[in-house]
Amino acid sequence: VNIAGEVDGSVLADNENVAAMFPGASDGYDSGLDIPDGSLITPPSNYLEIYFPHAATGDWTNPFSASRWMYDVRLNSDLTNAIETYTFTVNTDQDGEDVILNFTASNDYPSDYGVVLFDVEDDNYTDLKDSGYEYDYTFDEGAGSFNFYLQLGDATAPSVTYDNIPSDGQLYDTGDTVPVEWTLTDVTDIKTTAAYYSLNGGTDWTIVGSTESDPRIFTWDKSFTAPTTFTVQGKIRVLATDWAGNSGTDISSITFKIAPHTRTFTVPLGTSLVSVPEQLNNYFVETVFADLESAGRPYIVYKYLEGTGYIEVTELEFGQGYAISLGDAATSVSVTGTPMTGSQILGLNTGWNIVGAALATTTNTHLSVSELEFSVDGGAWTKLAQAGIDGTISPFLYYNDGSGNTAATNLEPWKGYWLWVEETDSVRMRTNASDVTTPAGGLSAPPEEQTDEWFVPIVVTQGDLHDAVAGFGVREGASDGFDLAYDMPAPPSMVSFVRAVFNHPEWDARVGSHFARDMRAPFEVGEAPSWVFRVEATDPGPVTVQFDVTEFTNRFPGVTLEASYPGGSIDLTETNSFTVNYTEAFDVVITVDAMNDVADGVDTEIPNEFSIRSAHPNPFNPSVTVEFGVPEASRIRAEVFNINGRHVATLSNSTYQPGVHSLTWNAAGLPSGIYFLAVSSDHGWSASKKLLLMK
């Protein structure tokens, strides 16, 4: 690295002063390598000198008796995780003038090494790479010397050692102090440091504090106060940059939890499902719903027993769900208690149960439905999906807010959920202390290892009422009869409702003849399957029935899916909804054209190679269409993953004929962020595409 200096606006300059390394050199005087400075004696006036000071003693004993050096050459060594410091002096008598120093790194100087200047007089660092390899200062000493350290090397980011942070899984109350203490170590001094915490596993970060210009071994305490947001996905992150320009981020492997004492919820007007969100000293109805009492709202709380119906109660049970009928107006209620952090076991009855949310996991939500566990007749604990396959528990839970049913993906505080249990002697449900949440779409989404499976959700609305749990489709393992794992029983109706139900008395199912979902086995080529569902409502008026045929059209582009209803019919691949002025229950018939192999692509072009051609729009909200080319008949698998590598959707796993095809992904239930589409074929080709969801 050459150092050149000049006095601004004058002819005074010193342009050749080299800090270097060379194989076979020493850290002392080396004949032919270390060259004495030309100005062995300072002139009387009007001068600018730059030199490396080394007294002519010890290792620097030399035949010139020189103590000022133009070349300072050291033994060549690896500086990836080390630095070599060269002291040099700038000497001038140009009082009040600006001195400009320029630094030039040779072509063989490693590009990842730092070039850092320390001004001894002003006690400050400069990253010369950031400053354009220039440093200016004003000489105002009358006459004299300024000393500098030139630090070369260091391509390694600072390392972080945590001294005191939360233990894995540690729970903090709102207002508690969360310790964040760590030590940074580096071979150069630290330029900047910042500490952050995240409440959603590292997706978003909140800064705790930052500092600048710290020593190379640096201990810092930036503890913070736990906020009011509920989380079990708390993370710590430290970001540090040294003066050599190396930046490093360390995210703690542990996760911590924050649980506010107070839970607030708005109870809807009318009849809805609720549960107790916290562990309380007592569970009397007037205690849990004290805010309704003080507001003078009329209300009644019921439990539900299969065969008996709704029974008014005066005391509640933690983990159990209830129905509440509220008059006058929707009202906010709060309770203060102790959050549940372990497993809660609840006994279930044969038939319909209302269960509660007893374990908090993610921000303002409880446990993932897929993580619920069940034990039948004292047997081993199994997940909900397996219990459905075993024929003991329906793998669907529903929340009803008074306006209609919605399939649940997570159990949330204050809410209650319908759950069906087949006839057994004893069933227990336990909330597992897992922090995993399922992707939006829950059990209605295509499973990860699908083949020709697809699902068409149905949403029925009438004014403020809705039913968002119905649908039809095919699943591997399903039959044309009742399958507890796939056919969703229609839950008990509330006071006012609108709903879509598939009537199957021939199934002779214990749950009855009404089903919200009718799933069949995949069809053979050439078959034309059909479904019939009935629309029911308590009141007359316009009813809208809407379908989402994305999965169907992805699997069968060009195949007609027809919906016939009183007064008309539509092709659902072109129009996805219809409205009827409801006066009495009516049937809707769904018919699929003869099911052939996947149709030709969107055009007649036959690509020369597999490729992802486009994704548009990108960024998108909430749907994106992806076009891909298939040069020969192939099974194509298209999946979507979030930025953490977690699988969130399977768009296709089907055979496609040669051509250009398209798939549409609707991410309405997912948060904004970066996602990755991965497409592969059974011929060994694979490719990926970054997608940006912006809401």
Image (cartoon, helix red, strand yellow):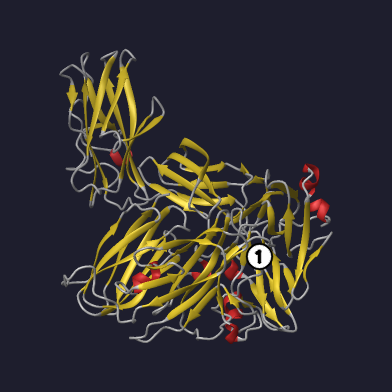
Judge the density around disc 1: few (<14), some (14-19), many (≥20) Cα neighbours within 10 Å.
Answer: many
Q: Which residue lies under the disc numbered 1? A: 417
Observer able to see residue 29: yes
Q: Who is closer to the viewer here, 174 or 596?
A: 596
Badge 1 amino acid? Tyr
Observer able to see residue 67: no
The structure residue drawn at horizontal position 25% and vertical position 67%, both measured from the top left corner, is 628
Q: Who is closer to the viewer here, 667 or 20?
A: 667
The structure residue drawn at horizontal position 25% and vertical position 48%, both measured from the top left corner, is 111
Give the side of residue 549 with respect to residue 403, left or right: left
Q: Quadrant of the N terminus?
A: top left
Q: Secondary structure at mark 1?
A: strand
> How many marks overall?
1
Task: Give coordinates of residue 445: x percent, y percent.
Answer: 47, 69
Q: Who is closer to the viewer here, 689 or 143?
A: 689
Q: Who is closer to the viewer here, 325 or 578?
A: 578
Give the side of residue 518 with respect to residue 113, left or right: right
Task: Give coordinates of residue 668: x percent, y percent.
Answer: 45, 57
Is residue 409 shown above or below 79?
A: below
Task: Give coordinates of residue 361: x percent, y percent.
Answer: 62, 59
Is residue 159 shown above or below 118?
A: below
Can you tell which quarter of the image residue 616 is in?
bottom left
Give the side of residue 560 with respect to residue 644, left or right: left
Task: Give coordinates of residue 666: x percent, y percent.
Answer: 40, 61
Is residue 239 shown above or below 659?
A: above
Can you tell which quarter of the image residue 630 is in?
bottom left
